[in-house]
Image: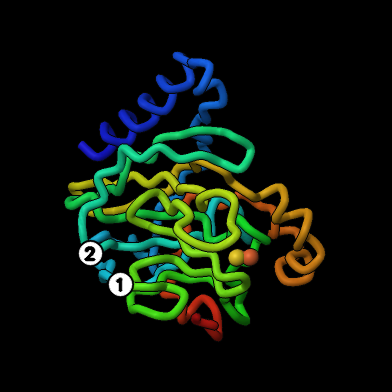
């Protein structure tokens, strides 16, 4: 069932690219990477039912050094939202997965100046609670320059200097096993710029694994266990 939903999503995306109009000439395709089962820190499958609303989870995908946010939203995210990248590429965000379509995942690399959660500190993360930058809350805030993204709307930019939404991570949900698989990205991924900007640091931290593709499994952690500190704003 869920697999069919995912295929439908890919098909919908592909359809958008096969019928371009003048205004839609730059419609983006999905980018499929190696499939990775989401697992917990013991290596056991991470069940969708384990996700708690309001908690910020992180896993690395599609590369060993590129973190992503995994969230269960308080309400279903139906999708059907048209978004645009800085370069003018267009795409339709088709919503969350899982029983209530409330599970979403996005690249955690800020679309402004590429702030991302490191092992030492994170200046970007999902805030459930209100704050001066987060407004009423339930948004992803980047405290570097105060960009705010709405995870219930394809991570579109709602405030700040970010020029495009966070890239969507394509998830599949196996309804029988309640397992989640990351399978690709959609929208404006920033990996090339990320490796150019932080390549030296990543090489020091991870060695040759920095640019290695995640294969088969991706470990899910709460942000508080992924980064030693979380700078919130
Ligand atoms: S790097 Fe995130 S807002 Fe500037």
Element type at mark 2: loop
Could you say where residue 107 lies in the image, as x and y percent from the top left? 52, 55
- Is 172 drawn above or below residue 21 in the view shown? below
Q: Quadrant of ligand 1?
A: bottom right
Q: Secondary structure at mark 1?
A: loop
- For disc 2, the neighbor class at 10 Å (few under 14, some 14 to 19, many from 20) is some
Residue 91 placed where, x, y %?
Answer: 46, 34
In front of the other: 66 or 76: 76
What residue is drawn where x is 73% and y is 55%? 195
Q: Earlier in the sequence, mark 1 or mark 2?
A: 1
Left or right position of 40 against 66: left
> How was the colour assigned to the protein in this rendering?
rainbow
Question: Which class describes the residues within 10 Å of circle 1: few (<14), some (14-19), or many (20+)?
Answer: some
The disc at residue 169 is none
Q: Position of residue 227 (x, y in %)?
A: 54, 79
Label 1 CB less than 8 angstroms from ligand 1: no
In the picture, the disc for residue 54 is 1
Mark 1 and mark 2 residues within 8 Å of each other at the beta carbon: yes
Side of 202 where 80 appears, left or right: left
Left or right of 233? Residue 193 is right
Q: Label 1 to label 2, Cα distance in Å?
A: 7 Å
- Residue 111 visible: yes
Q: Quadrant of residue 201?
A: bottom right
Q: Residue at point 35% right, 65% down?
A: 44
Q: Which residue is mark 2?
A: 74
Please tell me in which quadrant of the rendered image residue 199 appears: bottom right
Residue pictured at 46% horizontal, 54% vertical? 106
Q: Residue farthest to the right? A: 200
User: From the viewer's perspective, is residue 71 above or below residue 223?
Assistant: above
The CB of the residue at mark 2 lies under 8 Å from ligand 1 = no
Rendered location of residue 116, percent (x, y)? 60, 67
| Residue drawn at (50%, 43%) of the image | 185
């Amino acid at each position: 069932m869920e697999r069919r939903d995912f295929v439908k999503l890919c098909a919908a995306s592909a359809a958008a690219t096969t019928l371009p109009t003048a205004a839609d000439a730059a419609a983006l395709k999905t980018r499929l990477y190696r499939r990775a089962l989401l697992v917990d820190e013991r290596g056991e499958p991470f069940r969708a039912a384990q996700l708690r609303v309001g908690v910020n989870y992180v896993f690395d995908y599609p590369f060993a050094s590129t973190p992503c946010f995994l969230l269960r939203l308080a309400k279903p995210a139906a999708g059907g939202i048209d978004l645009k990248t800085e370069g003018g590429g267009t795409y339709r965000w088709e919503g969350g997965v899982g029983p209530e379509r409330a599970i979403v995942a996005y690249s955690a690399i800020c679309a402004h100046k590429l702030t991302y959660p490191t092992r030492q500190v994170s200046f970007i993360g999902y805030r459930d609670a209100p704050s001066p930058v987060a407004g009423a809350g339930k948004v992803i805030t980047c405290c570097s320059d105060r960009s705010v993204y709405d995870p219930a709307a394809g991570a579109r930019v709602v405030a700040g200097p970010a020029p495009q939404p966070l890239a969507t991570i394509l998830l599949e949900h196996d309804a029988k096993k309640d397992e989640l698989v990351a399978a690709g990205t959609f929208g404006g991924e920033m990996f090339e710029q990320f490796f150019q900007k932080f390549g030296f640091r990543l090489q020091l931290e991870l060695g040759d694994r920095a640019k290695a593709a995640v294969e088969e499994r991706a470990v899910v952690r709460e942000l508080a266990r992924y980064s030693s500190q979380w700078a919130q704003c």
